[in-house]
Amino acid sequence: MLACLGCGTPCESERALAPSGAIRHARFVGPDTYLEVASNAAGQLVRANCDGDLLRYDAGLAPRDAIDIEYQLDDEQSVDALVLADDGTLAVLSFELEYIGDIDAKSFTRLDVYDPSGERRWRAVLSTNEITHDYDLQIGPAQVYVAIPNRVIASDRDTGAFLWTQTTDGVAAASIAADPSGVVVATRTQLVAYDTRGAMRWSREPAMLGLAEYDRVATATDGSIAVLGNDGALADGSAQAIAMLDAEGALRWSVPLGERFADRVTSLVTDGDQIVAAGDYGGALGFAPDAPVSPDADGFVATVDAAGVRSVTTTTGAGTQRLYLTSLTADTVLGYATSFDDPTAPHLGLGDLAVDGNGIALLELAR
């Protein structure tokens, strides 16, 4: 999860970038801006700004309006997770902290759900006096799902009423994805589908893919499931693969996708036919040997189908560049690229688009 670090006043600036090649629209936000971003299949996007509030964009990354989260504590505020449903419903996990001297006196982690107009529908406190930023968040047709370490929680999307919880394995939050029937949960050792009552529909072990562990999961509107896994090795050379399953968890196809540690996948999106993955790599990109060699950490977007890796787009530049995906539309993929950590000034290159400085580039890329 990304949170704002080192923000001053004014905390950020924003400028539109000219389209470039496969880039339909882009906006750069900086300086020193580490943000949570979400988007939907309608091309709408929302991000948190350095003040801990929310900015919304219409299709084409056109600025729309802002939402004030209305925090209660003053010393520390952040947005830890965002999800934007296709109808414009927005779920937000936020954290706030109050100090007395050097002591953490009080803290909240809250879940807010806003309707498409930007009015808050409901608010629930998930934890108090517990500092953790390890969450995954999803919106389904009728429920909102939150994954925290060892647990998945479901609440009613309209009212916020608690509905059910299930325990999960592992000390980290599971990767979760809503589907038409409920939620799919990927822990390290199991892929599990739950219905809207919290009852298990099915489960699959990673051995189904010839692997040892799951890493990430995403779903399509038809219920198809994209999953990323690895062979469990902890050394360089640990293999990973990406796979498409049907709505009942049956394997449709699986494709190797480089090495777990060298070709790090940050996010997945899928339409049920293709899987689009994004992340970062150092040195050579294992599944695309023709990609530029990265001296630090550069980002990639890879489109994969049953025949293998169809296309790869990479970022370049000084400093650390990473790519994250947030949604697919009919003909674009939305996400963002980070650019930071260079001793002088980071430089982000994507196609013939170039931008200097610490920050992020909001992106709408042609598929």
Image (tube, rainbow, N blue to C red):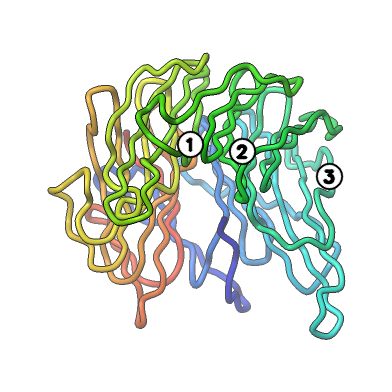
Residue 279 at what x, y percent from top left? 37, 50
SS class of the residue under badge 3? strand
SS class of the residue under badge 2? strand
Q: Is residue 74 above or below residue 56?
A: below
Q: Residue at x 49, y 32 (%)?
A: 218
**Circle 3 crowding by C-alpha within 10 Å: few under 14, some 14–19, many from 20:** some
Q: Which mark is residue 327?
A: 1
Q: Is residue 74 above or below residue 85?
A: below
Q: Is residue 162 above or below residue 23?
A: above
**Circle 1 crowding by C-alpha within 10 Å: few under 14, some 14–19, many from 20:** many
Q: Quadrant of residue 213?
A: top left
Is residue 207 rendered to the left or right of residue 145?
left
Pick the quarter of the image with the C terminus: top left
Q: Which mark is residue 84?
A: 2
Q: Cα distance, mark 1 to mark 3? A: 25 Å
Residue occupied by mark 3: 123
**Circle 2 crowding by C-alpha within 10 Å: few under 14, some 14–19, many from 20:** many
Q: Quadrant of residue 344?
A: bottom left
Q: Cα distance, mark 1 to mark 2? A: 9 Å
Looking at numbered disc 3 in the image, what kind of residue is underneath it? Arg
Residue 96 at what x, y percent from top left? 77, 63
Q: Residue at x 27, y 49 (%)?
A: 20
Pick the front one: 22 or 282: 282
Q: Earlier in the sequence, mark 3 or mark 2?
A: 2
Looking at numbered disc 1 in the image, what kind of residue is underneath it? Ser
Q: Cα distance, mark 3 to mark 2? A: 16 Å
* Tally of marks: 3
Q: Earlier in the sequence, mark 1 or mark 2?
A: 2
Q: Residue at x 39, y 52 (%)?
A: 323
Q: Is residue 323 above or below residue 196?
A: below
Is residue 12 rendered to the left or right of residue 69?
left
